Amino acid sequence: MSVAAPAAAATPKRRFRLKRLLVGALAILVIGAFANLVGWDLRGWFSDLWDTISGISTGYLVAAVTLKTVQTSLTAFGWYSILRFAYGDAVRWRDIWACYAASVALNGVLPANIGTLVMLLMFTAIIARATFAAILGGYAVQKIFFTLIGIFVYLYLFLSVGGSFDIKFEWVHTHPWATILLFGGGGFLLYLLIRRLWVRVVVWWDDAKEGGGILAHPRKYLVRVFVPSFLAWVASLGVMAVFLSAYDIPVSFHTLMRICGGNSIANVTSVTPGGAGVTQAFNVASLSGVTDAATATAYSVAQQLVTTAWNIILGIVLVVWAFGWSGGKQLVGESYDEAKQKAAEQQEARRARKEAKREAETA
């Protein structure tokens, strides 16, 4: 009896494992079918990825994915600190880490950074008391550092170019009255715009301030959000430096700032998944004078392929760890559907406002 009982128990376990393997195989087939329907050459993508990985030293790959994981984790910790302060014990680190990693992975394969909107909706789904307005308030607080560092990068690039002031501001000396009119009129128009929108901003902040409450405590914000965000940004520079070294491209602070600035513009202006194509164009321009165009393109493609693949792996692992396979798939799927719906509603609202304005002008 004592021997037969474990044997009987082993049969359902084997069946359970077989079922999981079959479900996994079916999931792979579904992913392949979806990729085929949307025109994504999955086989070609994996072929390019393998060629890229096999052409780079293992040491560089390990360093790159390690730094990328650090970047994702530290940025997620900033989010965790914001939401934990707002909602207390209802917020778990593992859940926030998984949601943020999923958004990074989705942004690599979906256009227009829709992965970020999916993440915001995931937060509202997993935190019982959270409203979408409050999560947007947290998003505004989380973006403070990255906005400031973006301004720093642009200022650095502008000021570090020899003769910038002479070239850029020559028209100020030759057209003083036009300059006064431009800045004076522009400032007045900006004041009118802020005055018109201020009531809406105040109303929005009343709804959103719960999510951004940590900002009212500067020390906690600095230690738990600002510093981790800064370290995440440094890690992102480290990722660039590793891939530059892998392709024997000279690494300097100035080169990193040029790439960082180009990537920022590509991220804002691109509507392709992960900024593919646009990012490569900006990287080639950023590395002009540092290396040849072919090497710059190879560097850019390698960095995007490897980091995108790793982001997908990390995102899947963390989502399954936090929510389970079925729960994670349902959470991401429902949030993605809602994100598409919200994006469509916003686009329709903008179209309706334009139509109303056009009708008012013709009336």
Image (cartoon, rainbow, N blue to C red):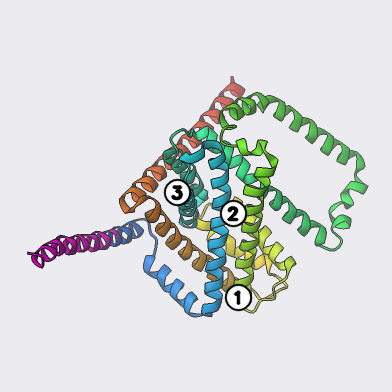
Residue at image mark 1: 294
- Looking at the rendering, in which quadrant would you find the N terminus? bottom left
Nearer to the camera, 117 or 185? 117
Q: Residues within 10 Å of mark 1 (few under 14, many from 20)?
A: few
Task: Decide whether the magenta segment is chiefly helix, strand or loop.
Answer: helix
Residue at image mark 3: 95
Looking at the picture, which amino acid does disc 3 mark? Asp
Looking at the picture, which amino acid does disc 1 mark? Ala
**Pair 1/3: label in front:** 3
- The numbered mark at residue 267 is 2
Q: Is residue 282 visible?
A: no
> At 8% from the left edge and 66% from the top edge, which residue is drawn?
4
For the magenta stretch, what is the residue range?
Answer: 1-27
- The numbered mark at residue 362 is none
Looking at the picture, which amino acid does disc 2 mark? Asn
> At 69% from the left edge and 73% from the top edge, which residue is drawn?
251
